[in-house]
Image (cartoon, rainbow, N blue to C red):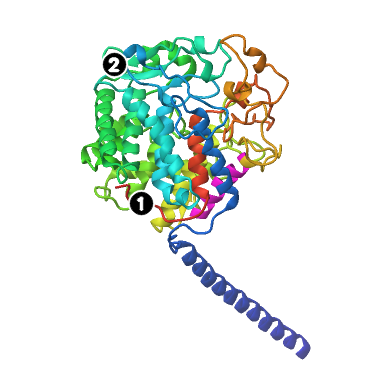
Amino acid sequence: MGEKSRSRGFLGWFLVLVILALVVGAVVYTIKKKMVDKKDNKPPPVPGPPGAIDKKYSDALKIAMQFFDVQKSGRLEDNKISWRGNSALTDGSEAKLDLSKGMYDAGDHMKFGFPMAFTATVLSWAILEYGDQMEAVNQLQPAQESLKWITDFLINAHPSENVLYIQVGDPEADHKCWERPENMKEKRPLTQVNESVPGTEVAAETAAAMASASLVFRAADSTYSSLLLRHAKQLFSFADNNRGSYSKNIPEVATYYNSTGYGDELLWAASWLYHATGDQSYLRYVTGENGNQFAQWESLSWFSWDNKLAGTQVLLSRLSLFGAKGASGNSGLENYRKSAEDVMCGLLPKSPSATSSRTDGGLIWISEWNSLQHPVASAFLAALYSDYMLTSQTAKLTCGGRSFKPSDLRKFAKSQADYVLGSNPLKMSFLVGYGDKYPQYVHHRGASIPVDATTGCSNGFHWLTSPNPNPNVAVGALVGGPFLNETFIDSRNNSKQAEPTTYNTALIVGLLSSLVTTSSAVRSFT
């Protein structure tokens, strides 16, 4: 009986010790978790001036920037591309305008005003956000020069308040030719929008381009900056007061750059005009009735030449995050910020609301045609938002109950850039001229025809079908990209995958500039 009593006593004390150990363990775990949570909620350190240079992204940026020179039209100044020369010198002459500058849209010789203006807006945004990082690798001046080459064209394309020339060349006739731009002799007709034939989206995008560019040139050339801003204001008024879709009013443009609506461009342009002027009327425009009508708060979208909503949401988020004048308590701005956060949550691979629109290799994949536009654009926005969070000391982003740090967004942005640069199943760079393996049969007329070849409009097509690689390297071209199954057919006839675009270059320049090094975001563009 004594043995049993001692046994029961020992068992009792053992249970007490076990319970005590569990209690102590739970207390320690709770304390540690609170410490971790406190650490996670602690604002991250604000980056200072540009830090160490990442050579991979620096090298890629220097290459990507050169495609703007490849695409230039007009009388070239300080030409850096050996196989390019003067071209389209009489563009605009039928209207007694000089529209010789600007840039060719892709592998053809068209000047489409809608995507060209978007190119200028995105390039301006990249310079405004990452000009110090571009300067750290000697790429700021080339970026500014390329931007001005476009804005010079846009200024001349807007000869009066309610007239904007939006296209140079006939795309049907142009696409029946395969020749070097230097040898073009075909007629180059002009297309315009005006009060009778409105084109809200293209006029508003051009206003956004000029407003953002006015900020770029404000310090270096105040006269030119003021000229750009005057055009931007006029074009916005024209776009807003004469509402109508350019692709409905001019149906032939829909084959190439069909617009799905103009509300996003109006918000985008007004946002840039607010940044350029500080005029509260533009802020009221985007946060009031027009915001409610066009912002589509609950509907996520992909940033592209056609849809500017995600870009507008991120751009306006900087006002909330940096405590700009008029931002406090502004429910409209909070809607933009919340929508921007939803966009970010959709991009982060481990987020509960992560998009499933990805390749097995992790690339955002939305469209079979020009598939790299969307992942590069999304990565650029993610890099921007990450830097806004760091500079504003915003510790985390919450997605469906899970928390993510600015570093998670930057990691995503890097993953998309790295895929483009060769970290993909094909082990191939989609940026021409970068790495050891990149496309050799880029769908680009000038690159495919030897400089000393004599060709007219129609007798140059044997260069399109030639089995030989391009004789000229379209350095810096970002080609269309892979299919969903991560295959790529390197063929000049494969314009879906092998054709580069100028606006893709603006996006990749923005993304690479964000990754070259780290620095704090500018709190205001003015």
> Which stretch is magenta?
405-420
Would you say the magenta stretch is mainly helix, strand or loop? helix
Query: Which residue position is annotated with label 1?
Result: 321
Q: Is residue 408 magenta?
A: yes
**Quick one: label 1, few (<14), some, or many (20+) residues within 10 Å?**
many
Look at the numbered disc 1 and give the secondary structure of its residue.
helix
Residue type at the position of mark 2: Asn
Q: Is residue 297 left or right of residue 383?
A: left
Look at the numbered disc 2 and give the secondary structure of its residue.
loop
Q: Is residue 82 left or right of residue 9?
A: left
**Quick one: label 2, few (<14), some, or many (20+) residues within 10 Å?**
some
Comparing marks 2 and 1, which lies closer to the viewer?
2
Residue 217 pos. (x, y %): 33, 41
Q: Is residue 244 magenta?
A: no
Assess whether mark 1 and mark 2 are in contact (beta carbons under 8 angstroms).
Answer: no
Residue 277 pos. (x, y %): 24, 41
Give whichever of 106, 351 is nearer the camera: 106
Residue type at the position of mark 1: Leu
Q: CA distance from mark 2 to mark 1?
A: 38 Å
Query: Which residue position is annotated with label 2?
Result: 194
Q: Is residue 84 above or below residue 35?
A: above
The quadrant holding residue 149 is top left
Residue 167 pos. (x, y %): 40, 18
Residue 329 pos. (x, y %): 26, 49
Sequence order check: which comes first, mark 2 or mark 1? Answer: 2
